[in-house]
Amino acid sequence: MEAQLPITTCCGSPDTGLLVSGARAKERLAICRTCERLRPYIQQCGACSCFVYVKVRLQAAQCPLGKW
């Protein structure tokens, strides 16, 4: 079985422009957690079906509802 790599290994770091900073990801996640469309038991967005823990870290990602 192949070892799983941390997201910073496969997607870069905030310095490469692929990921946002940890502080920015926390801000985004806080917004998601207050959203009525969040499926909290699986941390999935009900609007786009993305898993928010991953999506909030990606620089190019946007909230489908325009919240961040």
Image (cartoon, grey):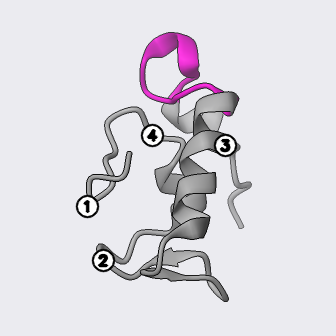
Q: Eyeballing the image, is 67 above or below 49? A: above
Which of the two labelled residues, at mark 4 and mark 3, occupies the earlier sequence position?
3
**Which mark, residue 26?**
3
Mark 2 highlights which residue? 47
- Circles 2 and 1, Cβ within 8 Å, touching? The answer is yes
Which of the two labelled residues, at mark 1 and mark 4, occupies the earlier sequence position?
4
Which of the two labelled residues, at mark 4 and mark 2, occupies the earlier sequence position?
2
Front position among marks 4 and 2: 2
Helix, strand or loop under label 3: helix
**Dominant secondary-structure state across the stretch colored magenta:** loop
Foreground residue among 14 and 47? 47
> Neighbour class for label 2 at 10 Å: few (<14), some, many (≥20)?
few
> Neighbour class for label 3 at 10 Å: few (<14), some, many (≥20)?
some
**In 3D space, how far apart are the residues under numbered discs 1 and 3 (Cα atoms)?**
18 Å
Q: What kind of residue is marked 4?
A: Leu
Mark 1 highlights which residue? 64
**In 3D space, how far apart are the residues under numbered discs 2 and 1 (Cα atoms)?**
7 Å
**In 3D space, how far apart are the residues under numbered discs 1 and 4 (Cα atoms)?**
14 Å
Q: What residue span does the magenta drawing correspond to?
A: 12-22
Front position among marks 1 and 4: 1
Mark 4 highlights which residue? 58
